[in-house]
Amino acid sequence: MTDLHRLSIRELSEGLAEAKFSSRELTEHYLKRIEKIDAQVQSYVTVTAEQALAQANAADAAIKAGNASALTGVPIAHKDIFCTQGIKTTAGSKMLDNFISPYDATVVAKAKAAGLVTLGKVNMDEFAMGSTSESSYFGATKNPWALDHVPGGSSGGSAAAVAADLAPFATGTDTGGSIRQPASFCGLTGLKPTYGRVSRFGMIAYASSLDQGGPMARSAEDCAYLMNVMAGHDAKDSTSVQKDVDDYVVNLNGTSIKGLRIGIPKQYFNVQGLDADVKARVEESLKKLEEMGATLVEIDLNMTESYVPTYYLIAPAEASSNLQRFDGVRYGYRCENPVDLMDLYKRSRSEGFGPEVQRRILIGTYALSAGYYDAYYVKAQKVRRLIQQDFLKAFENVDVIAAPSAPTTAYRISANLSPVEMYLGDIYTIAVNLAGLPAINAPVGFDKDNLPVGLQLIGNYWSESQLLSVIHQYQQATDWHTKRAAIAEENA
């Protein structure tokens, strides 16, 4: 079959169970597509063809023996921030270009236990710091919709791989929008779960109080299948929450859109820099949800102007702490011929880290220094609580909150955005991470240049089922999630 890459996760699962095709055939199909197409997209850092075929053979045996789960034999790509035993795990950095992980991240281990087949590791902004995937040591990933544009970041490789049909779905991580923004730029569905819903064990840390793993796929239904694997308490992760996990697939029709109250923050739609096409497509999608029975309620989120400065104090401070372990001594990059220990530290870190990572380490170290800790970091944490309370007050009157996922569509590669311009592009996503809330992106149309536009829905804590359900029903009534870039239509 030449069109296996066009099947949904449910169709792949049913096809494998009914022996319409084998996992090996499916895996070989994707590996051939990667070999043919990925040179143009550059989404993969490492392709694990030999391991994938071995896993596919094991999956076929399990299916034949009647020991299969819903996803046994379905291929997946992992963001190169998740540790994978025996496979290079780089976090997009020269610092870890030689690092072979001795263990699996919990997310990877769960995927293996579910019978998923790992196609490889996909590209990302270095240590998840960036919004374009251009800061990767391995080069910039391209947006399948326009190869001279970025796919977003930091989970740009995950988004590009799925958008080019080089994987049915992929894992991503979201520290300040790194699932939702690339999903928006590449016309995909991407879910950032509630903080603590998905284990962070084995996920290379950027900002520990903000990082959260989640699924990226074409539809809410596809994301629900992967969430059933990813979600759950993990004793190895002290930030993982012990709370019952929903069956996200079963619950896809569990929320009625009739009577659903959707909050429309007036501050979000008056942000300077919001593209007219993005605003129009998001408003059209909200009108469609209103036609389906939802009620639009104007709300105030008064802390909006505090989002960017608060995030860009807290996240770099935590990055500064987390990245101090990369010192050229224990593992990772080490400079040549250091003259003494201080020279080893300085040159290993200055040569191993890229400019954006160095910038955030310096900002974070400054904010944590003795003279400025109370004035900057402690104050930012207090404002963070006010941002959380602002959302909780809004949820007293609405069920979900709607916003664009990004103020623009995908940037051109080498657009030379200043750091401040890039940071301001996170205005709609970072508050969700500061508050620990769940949020989802869904494709809702295109701009004048045929680049995808995304709608973001933000939910109250533990409302992943509700978010997936609302978007699933929206996707039953629209076809934006079925649109494919020209490069994705090429057959292997």
Image (spheres, rainbow, N blue to C red):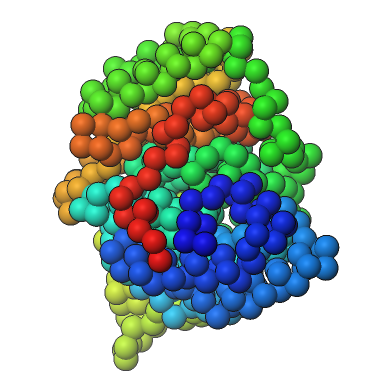
Q: Quadrant of residue 27?
A: bottom right
Marks counted in the figure total 0
Residue extending farthest bottom: 337
Nearest the viewer among 119 and 388 is: 119
Q: Is residue 140 visible?
A: yes
Q: Which quadrant does the C terminus fall into?
A: bottom left
Q: Position of residue 409 (x, y in %)?
A: 28, 37
Question: Compared with residue 426, is residue 43 higher up or lower down, i.e. above or below?
Answer: below
Picture layout, residue 141 above or below residue 87: above
- Residue at 43% from the left image edge and 55% from the top image edge: 165
Name the residue located 56 percent from the left edge and 65 percent from the top edge.
Answer: 26
| Residue at left offset 61%, top offset 53% | 12
Q: Position of residue 338 (x, y in %)?
A: 33, 87
Task: Tell me: 404 left or right of 202.
Answer: left
Residue 3 as seen in the image, left or right of residue 428: right
Q: Position of residue 283 (x, y in %)?
A: 37, 18
